[in-house]
Amino acid sequence: FHDRLAQEASRARRQRHKLSMILIDLDRFKAINDAHGHLAGDRMLKSFGALILQGIRREVDSAFRYGGDEFVVLLPGLSPKRAAHVADRLHCASATQGVDFSHGVATLAASGPVADFLRAADRRMYRMKTRRKK
């Protein structure tokens, strides 16, 4: 993921194109693992990963399991608005499988550390997660 992120960020800045990211965290994943076992949790992760791959542009976008129950989608050429639309579409599709998630969308700044790009998506995701818990 980090290698691809660096490549895409470099390309976006060089070509002056947008690069957006969706950081996704599955809601209540631990409860599912605890109630149904780790094999069920693994099946859910695989199923959700497949759902992401079906909802993005092949050969253009990239999806990664970021760790635990988190995923990252890199969306070259997409504005924040279009990236949010992809996130909403994935959210609707996941609801049909009984999976809910929180997400954060960010777009790479013209300059500055790439790590700030990831942190922005992370902050937005946790803001959504916090609002959902209320």
Image (tube, rainbow, N blue to C red):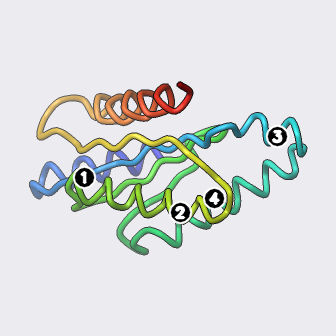
Work out whether 31 lies above or below 99.
Answer: above
Q: Amino acid at mark 1?
A: Leu
Q: CA–CA distance between discs 3 and 1?
A: 34 Å
**Left-right relation of 125 to 16:** right
Q: Amino acid at mark 4?
A: Phe
What SS does tag 3 mark? helix
Q: CA–CA distance between discs 2 and 1?
A: 18 Å
- Residue 39 at what x, y percent from top left? 87, 51
Where does label 2 land, which residue? Answer: 52
- Classify mark 1: residues with Cα within 10 Å, few (<14), some (14-19) or many (20+): many
Where does label 3 land, which residue? Answer: 33
Q: CA–CA distance between discs 4 and 2?
A: 6 Å
- Residue 43 at what x, y percent from top left? 78, 57
Return the disc, 1 or 4, that comes first in the chain's sequence: 1
Q: Are marks 4 and 2 in contact (CB under 8 Å)?
A: yes
Where does label 1 land, which residue? Answer: 19
Q: Say the numbered circle drawn on residue 48.
A: 4
Q: Say the numbered circle drawn on residue 122.
A: none
